[in-house]
Image: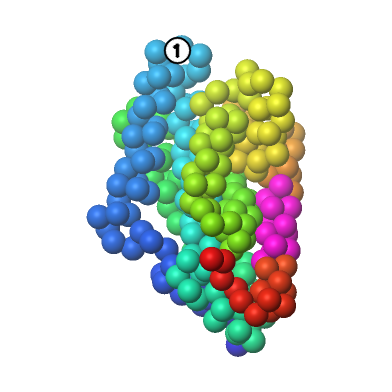
Amino acid sequence: MSAARLAVTGGVLSFRALFNWMRPGIYLPTMLGVPLFQIILFVYLGRYSRLHDDAFYIVGNAIAVSGMASVFGMTMVISNERYFGTLASVFASPAARIPLFFGRVIPVAFHGLLVSAFGFLTGAALFGFRIPGLRLLPLAGVVGLTVVASAGVGMFLGSLGLRVRDVYFVSNVAYVLMLLVSGVNVSTGLLAPWLEALGQALPLTHGIAAGRAVLSGPGTPVLRELGWTAGLGTAYALAAYAFFRLWEIEGRRRGSFDIY
């Protein structure tokens, strides 16, 4: 099997088999209902506080919800291999590890783009938010890069989930922290220095900044923020793969891939 076919087929099958939100009754309120009410809540809070206009909160939250899909999706797709008892089969497979591991980003990234698009449509339908035609394609590129980079964070958490007992608690805390420190609803300059520094280490922070800069007008800040987004996402993904391989080597040495 070619590397490209392995990446696509393995990613799609793992997403279908291990992603818990297969039923519409769970999927719709979780992945579409949460973004809907999140945007409504923060737009009205923003109007009350009068700190920023509606666009600030719509753009921030519409990009952030794509990060939610990437973080939770990748965490579950990878860590559920252990929870569902299929990790040993994955490690026993002779398939090349790089396409097998990174191919799982493909359906998750597509899913994140879908959720983000729904967020922007929510802003347009409920609050009259409009994206200038010439800036629609650059904004889509920013969102796409942010989704893939945020998937790197999800990979990292998912790889830790191959050893951590309660990875869902970790992923939930991580997403709440991302909402706090990534400039989604509060400008990063208003945060405590250590929180601002934490936010700068997340690709979502730079992706949101790039998205707002695109709508304000193209320029150097957009390219700089995109560079940080891509670099941080790559760093998280490489660290995740390193842990994945480490757990495989350690599991083979111990003769077990399960934690009890």
Where does the image place residue 216, in percent across and percent down from the top left?
59, 28
What secondary structure characterizes most of the magenta part? helix
98 is within the stretch colored magenta: no
Q: Nearer the viewer, residue 80 or 226?
A: 80
235 is within the stretch colored magenta: yes
- Three-letter code, disc 1: Ser
> Which of the 4 image quadrants contains residue 247?
bottom right
The quadrant in which the N terminus is found is: bottom right
The quadrant in which the C terminus is found is: bottom right
Vertical side of 14 occupied by 195: above or below:
above
Q: Nearer the viewer, residue 141 or 23?
A: 23
Residue at 36% across, 41% down: 34
> Which of the 4 image quadrants contains residue 97?
bottom right
Residue at 63% across, 21% down: 191
| Residue with the mark numbered 1 | 49
Where does the image place residue 129, in percent across and percent down from the top left?
40, 30
- Residue 53 visible: yes
Vertical side of 84 occupied by 146: above or below:
above
Which portion, as a residue range, is magenta? 232-244
Residue 176 placement, left or right of 27: right
- Residue 215 visible: no
Where does the image place residue 202, in percent across and percent down from the top left?
66, 41
Neighbours of disc 1 within 10 Å: few (<14), some (14-19), many (20+): few
Residue 23 placement, left or right of 78: left
